[in-house]
Structure formats: structure tokens, C-alpha cells
Amino acid sequence: MTVPEENPQNIQQSIHADDSGVAFVQGSGTQHNNVTQNYFGSGGLPTTPENLYRQGEMKLQALEWDEAHLFLTAAAEAGHVEAMQRLSGFPSMGGAFWTQKIAEIGDADALYSLGMTARAKRDGNYPRERAMYREEALEWFEKALQAGREDALVDIGYLLYEAERYEEAIPYLEKALQYLERTGESDEQFLARRLKSSRKKVARQREREAKMLRSDTGRRWWQTSKSD
């Protein structure tokens, strides 16, 4: 199978109705036209996004990758979300492009996937780049959480701990542990240790701040007394 570009330029569809009133997809790619005309047009099924998607699924099942790519792309460009989701799982079919597209409309899985991509990029980088990708990952995971991916709590809690933002990490780690206990997934002990460590670090920081405040208050009192 020929590997397509991230945003294929030779598969641009415009859906319109011909003189008979039947919708038809006109693509600029020769193969796209040949494939769709075998199934659609005035003598075939209406070229609705759903029909394009169904044909794409049939082609996938038959392992006819090129035609599956064409049908699914036609459906996706017509706004069919399931087609976009299907394409996002195939790097050779422009998966990264479609993942970004469905993330833009609030798909929780796509948002989480972008978070994982950014999280992976932080490994092996210099501190500044590492911090940049961590922040990017946190933004995506937060959006994924808001969209319904509860497991993003684990990632957010861990990344905040890694960034030494312990006070921010604590509520996420607490909720992540509740999630893991409820679902029976792994990493429970690992997160429990991070939560315990975060609480200790926050407590010590507050003790240091209280001590500095008392010391500063004492100095101001002593200086005031001397001036009197």
C-alpha cells in the first residue's frame, strides 16, 4: 500500500447533487474517482457520509487498504466522526492528522492520545524542552479528563509530581487512587507512594514557611524595639 501524506492533497472531495438529484462525490484523485463511481452516482447508492463510511469498513474487512483509505477519507472530510476515529488508528492513512481533527471537536480518546504523544516527547530532551512537553501533555490530559477520560487523572498526578508541583498533584493523585481502586487497574502502589511523598513535601514546605514568617516577625519586632 502506498503510504499517504498526513493530509492527503489528492483526495479532496466536494459533495453535490447531479441533475437527477442524487448526491455524488467528485474527487481530484483518479483512483478515488474510479473507486467511488463503481458504487455511487445516479445508478447507485446516495453518496452520504454514512454510506462512504460503511464502504470503507467493508474494504477494511476485505484488507483492501487503498480503497478503504479512499472511502474513509471521503466520509471523514464530509464530517463523519466515526470515519475520522477509524482513520486516526492508522498512521499510514494520515492517523496523526485525523487524531488532531477529532481532538478539536472534543473526542476524549483523541485528546488523551495527544497527551500521550507529548508525554513521550519529553523523554530524552534537555530540561527546557522536557518542561515544555510536560506542560503540553498536562493541557491535553486535562482536556481529556474534562471530556470523560477519567484515567487521565493518573497521568496528570504523575506529571505534576514529576514537575515538583506537589500541592497541585495531591488532589489529582487522590482521585487517581480512587479511580484505580474502583477499576482494579495497575500503578496503585506507585501512585500511593507519590501521594504520600507529596503530602510530606508540602507539609515540610509549610513548616519552613511558618518558621521563616516567625523569624521575620521576630526581626521586625527587635528592630522596632531598638529604634524606640
Image: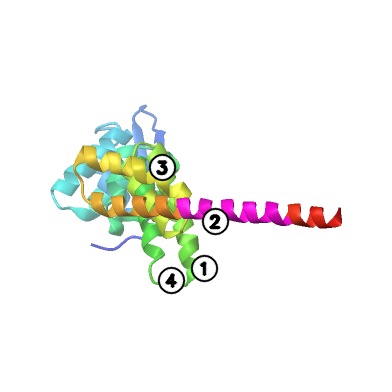
> Magenta span has 217?
yes
Quadrant where the image shows the N terminus: bottom left
Residue at the image point whose x is 39% and y is 72% from the top: 124
Dot 1 corresponds to which residue?
A: 128
Of circles 2 and 3, the one toward us is 2
**Magenta segment boundaries in residue numbering:** 202-219
Of circles 2 and 1, the one toward us is 2
Q: Amino acid at mark 4?
A: Asn
Q: CA distance from mark 4 to mark 2?
A: 33 Å
The reply to whether dot 2 and dot 1 touch (C-beta < 8 Å) is no
Name the one closer to the observer, 39 or 195: 195
Q: CA distance from mark 1 to mark 3?
A: 26 Å
- Name the magenta segment's main secondary structure: helix
The reply to whether dot 3 and dot 4 touch (C-beta < 8 Å) is no
| Residue 208: assigned label | 2
Q: Amino acid at mark 1?
A: Arg
Specify the quadrant of the image occupied by residue 51: top left
Name the one closer to the observer, 129 or 101: 129
| Residue 171: assigned label | 3
Question: How far across and down, in percent of the image, does residue 25 sit?
Answer: 36, 40
Dot 4 corresponds to which residue?
A: 125
- First along the sequence among labels 2 and 1: 1
Give left or right: position of 147 versus 83: right
Residue at the image point whose x is 36% and y is 62% from the top: 120
Mark 3, other Cα within 10 Å: few <14 / some 14–19 / many ≥20? some
- First along the sequence among labels 3 and 4: 4
Q: Under tag 4, what secondary structure?
A: loop
Q: Amino acid at mark 3?
A: Pro
When the figure is inspected, residue 131 is found, relative to residue 217, above or below; the finding is below
- Total number of numbered discs in the rendering: 4
